[in-house]
Image (spheres, rainbow, N blue to C red):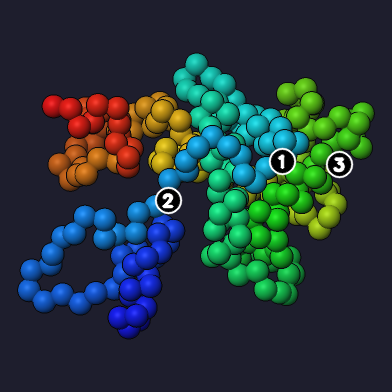
Amino acid sequence: MGSAGAAAAAGIHDGELGAPPQTYTGKVPWQEGAADAPPAALGTDFRFFTPAERSFIEAAVNRLIPPDPAGPSAVEANVPFFLDRQLAGPFGRGDHYFLGGPWKKGAAEQGYQMRFSPAQLYRAAIKAVDDYAAANFHGAAFASLADADKDKLLKGLEAGTVQLGDGVDAKSFFAMLLQNTKEGYFSDPLYGGNKDMAAWKMIGFPGAHYDYSEWVTRHGEKVPYPTVGMKGRPGWSES
């Protein structure tokens, strides 16, 4: 990348590029803000899911991580908002996916093998699951099912025993939904999930502190630092 390319890269902040390439001699300088900071999920509005899709997502993720005295449910941790913003952005577009054909069903170790981008997969799969629910559970949408029936349907998606329409592979969708739910639950709150860092607090993870080197060999000890995210914490700058 030449100087023109470096200059162009410096003006793009999407969390994917890292710092623009430069050549240094002697002491490496430090400049605040030179790295490509990850984009924060701001606001509270949903930008990808329709109201019906949001109802499905909230119902589904709250069965994957249900309410529990030990910690928040997926909805309480703001996972649906995290998913919405991810699907409305580069991940949803499949920026790092190869989406060209052929789309033959591959082996499990070959990873994602569908023609859909993640956003397209969610949109098609939610409709397909709701259609399946209506056909097999007396006309009800997934969000309206009893918890036991939601669990039964989700287990069918996981096992691949539920056959969905619109070219959707049930196992692939379930795998992505589960993975993305865990990511939203345990990711830095900067991305919109893990509200109030509650999931980190539940497992005793102090978060994005600058340096943990002194704790590398201290196995089994509780780290006595207050939980902090990449954007800090309430009172983090106070002495």
In the image, which disc is placed on residue 39?
2
Q: Amino acid at mark 3?
A: Asp
Q: Quadrant of the N terminus?
A: bottom left
**Which badge, 1 or 2, is on the more N-terminal residue?**
2
- Mark nearer the viewer, 2 or 3: 2
Q: Position of residue 205 (x, y in %)?
A: 33, 33
Quarter of the view holding residue 97? bottom right
Q: Residue visible at 62% across and 29% down?
A: 62
- First in residue order: circle 2 vs circle 3: 2
Residue 154 in view (yes/no): no
Residue 174 percent location from the top left of the image: 67, 46
Which of the 4 image quadrants contains residue 139?
top right
Q: Which is more toward the observer, 178 or 94?
A: 94
Which kind of residue does numbered mark 1 sit on?
Thr
Residue tagged 1: 50
Q: Secondary structure at mark 3?
A: helix
Instruction: Quickly name the residue at label 3.
Output: 131
Circle 1 or circle 3, nearest the eye = 1
Does 227 sit above or below residue 113?
above
Who's the residue at 47% across and 23% down the image? 71
Q: Secondary structure at mark 2?
A: loop
Sort mark 3 into few (<14), some (14-19) or many (20+) by Cα contacts within 10 Å: some
Residue visible at 53% across and 41% down? Answer: 82
Q: Is residue 155 left or right of residue 189?
A: right
